[in-house]
Amino acid sequence: MLQLLIDIALTPAVYFALHGRFGLTTTAVLLISIAAGGLWTALTLARTRKVDVVSLCVLGGIVIGGALTMLTGNPQFGVAKDSLYTGVFGLVALASMGAKRPLMYYLIRQFVADDNWASPMFRRCLRVMTLTWAIGLLIEAATRIVLVPTVSVNTAAALSPVLTGVALAVLMTWTAGYGRRAGEARRVAEA
């Protein structure tokens, strides 16, 4: 959880720490903040030697957002980059609904026994969770895409991590409650 909070907060924190200082343009400050976020994620991957989907999405979004900002000179791409990884993650989750096992299964399987998959109620629960996360993340990404060009870069940079934090908090809270209720219903049904 701490890693996720740092991933969300580091880039805007660096942005606001440097903005208006040292004679740097908004684009330069944004690129430095993107580089700081990318470096943090890369160092974490190197330190833990554990590659996970979330870190790869974050790193991919950072690289693409930074590249688009450099190529176009438009700092809005640097802020909108967050939509890339939440949007891609949402699309992958949505696409996994057609797979034998949805994405949520692979994200939680270290916490549950594989034999749980034999339960139709467990499979339904994971499919509902996966679909809910897909829709939630796609809404979050679409909101940012609409927000970024309609407000100043500073406002968008400030609101972007808040939007992500709120979306993740809502999805995690819903998931914990739904998982608990589904587990209780499964225990009752199987008793």
Image: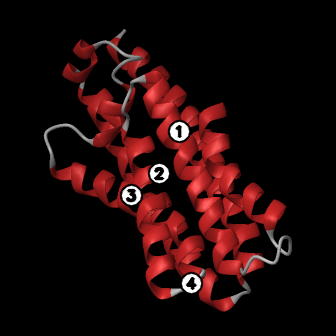
Residue type at mark 4 is Val
Q: Which residue is mark 1?
A: 175
Residue type at mark 3 is Gly
Q: Are marks 1 and 4 in contact (CB under 8 Å)?
A: no
Q: CA distance from mark 1 to mark 3?
A: 15 Å
In the rendered structure, find residue 190 and report the number of the disc placed on it: none
The x, y position of residue 80, in whole percent, is 54, 73
Q: Are marks 2 and 3 in contact (CB under 8 Å)?
A: no
Q: Earlier in the sequence, mark 1 or mark 4?
A: 4
Residue most toward the front? 22
Out of 3 and 165, give the one closest to the viewer: 3
Q: Which residue is mark 3?
A: 90
Out of 69 and 130, give the one closest to the viewer: 69
Residue at position x 64%, y 50% from top? 8
> Dividing the picture into quarters, in which one does residue 34 lie?
bottom right
For disc 4, the neighbor class at 10 Å (few under 14, some 14 to 19, many from 20) is few
Q: Which residue is mark 4?
A: 146
Residue type at mark 2 is Val
Out of 26 and 60, give the one closest to the viewer: 26
Q: CA distance from mark 4 to mark 2?
A: 20 Å
Q: CA distance from mark 2 to mark 3?
A: 13 Å
Q: CA distance from mark 1 to mark 2?
A: 22 Å
Does 67 sit above or below residue 55? below
For disc 2, the neighbor class at 10 Å (few under 14, some 14 to 19, many from 20) is many
| Nearer to us: label 2 or label 3 | 2
